[in-house]
Amino acid sequence: MPKWFTPAAILCGLMFVISPVLIARAPDEASMGMVYKIYYYHMPSAWMFLLAPLVCGVSSAMFLVRGRPGDDRRAWAAAELTVLFGALTLITGPLWARRAWGTWWVWDARLTSSLVGWMIAWAYLILRRYGGPGSDKLAAGVALFGAVNVPFIFISVNYWRTIHPPTTVVPKLRVDMGVPLWFCVFAFLLLFMLLMTMRLRLEETRARLDDLYVALDE
Amino acid sequence: MNATPFGRSLWLVLRKDLTVEVRSREIAYTTLFFAASCVLVFAFALVREGRAPEGGAAGILWIAIAFAGTLALGRTFERERQSETLRALLLSPMPRPAIYVGKLLGIVALLVGTELVLVPLVVFLFNARLFAHPFWLAGIVLGGTIGYAAVGTLFAAMLVRARSRDVLLPVLLYPVVVPVIIAGVQGTTALLQPNFDAVLVRFWLLLLVTFDVVFVVLALWTFEAVMSD
């Protein structure tokens, strides 16, 4: 593991311990009261859910151009993180929606495109698992289409009539609401990087072990 | 190595596919029969007391196109796999994008042929007023078909050598083409409204054209990169 990993992991753990305190001390929202506070975890995980398929798509494009296994491993790890952070987003979102909108789910552009993005990541992983030899390149092709979906998710709230809050909400937040939010964003980003590093390390070790087996056979 | 010009290569691939299909008619007949069966299954599932549900026709039409399209895509490339003819195509000195576009046009032609029967069938069975605006309808159906086939042709070609390709094609294809299906269904639903709103229909058509352009460009690049060995 790189040297920064342990201190970063401790920092990340501390941030997730402190974050509920900060969120609890943040003021209630005028119309929704304290129910809105799940947003402090929902939005950062949603941002990671947008970041992960972009990392996956860019790494896949690099893998298709250069053919280096490292790019492929990064794409694979990012696809798994898309599924993880997508699950967090799709669980915390309906919890909020149940109280704010009175329903768990609506078929609007933001929710639908997010679900589609999550399913593309699942499709990627299913292909890697069951596609057999050569599925790394095929999966890279799928990842490109997953990355194209990301800008669509992002702009969907601003172009379609929907009840999901638009992206312009974030810069307009009051300071006492903005500080816990950015704290959580940083905590999630750190978690993203840590998980990515761990996952890459695992795949690299596995690849080295495979090479050793091959060398032993020869 | 690009000895054969783009247009001629494209035409050769397309003509080969059409000739094989015209001689056997295997994919056309099976796809058409399967599409009609889909419509019937939905008719049995949704019709209550002899009446079709309001606005159900658009959804049924697009589900039938999507399901039948998967069948046609799988079969078209299974044919290329049997005697390793896809490898022969890739080894030939044709530009790769021409092979992709040729296969794409072949699939689109096949699906349009199916739709020529499917749309009247839906109109007839569900009392849908789809023919009130024939040009808009043609635009929406063609736009959706191209978007669907653009991704479908790429994925079916990629999966030719993969294990369990029959299962993987719909697994990969449907999440990616959901936006196209949504725009197709919404555009067709807008056509069925009693008060025709040209602005709304044009919006969905433009969205479909946007998807078509994005998907075809991305697929052209990906086809070249993925089919390189």
Image (cartoon, coloured by chain):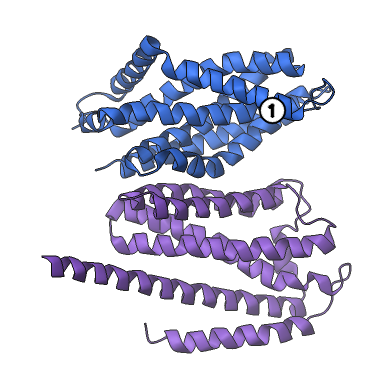
Chain colours: A purple, B blue
- Give the chain of mark 1: B
Side of B154 relative to B192 (left or right): left
Q: Amino acid at mark 1?
A: Phe
Q: Residues within 10 Å of mark 1 (few under 14, many from 20)?
A: some
Q: Identify which residue is drawn at 49% across, 58% down.
A: A54
In this orientation, does residue A34 appear? yes
Q: In this orientation, which residue lies closer to the viewer: A21 or A165?
A: A21
Look at the image and tell me in which quarter the C terminus of chain A lies: bottom left
Q: Identify which residue is drawn at 74% across, 23% down.
A: B191
Say above or below: B192 vs A161.
Answer: above
Look at the image and tell me in which quarter the N terminus of chain A lies: bottom left
Disc 1: which residue: B42
**Residue B65's image quarter?**
top right
Say above or below: A185 vs B166.
Answer: below
Q: Residue furthest right?
A: A31
Side of B21 relative to B35 (left or right): left
Where disc 1 sits, the SS reads helix
Measuring from the top left, give residue A102's x and y in whole percent: 85, 57
Q: In this orientation, which residue lies closer to the viewer: B116 or A185?
A: B116
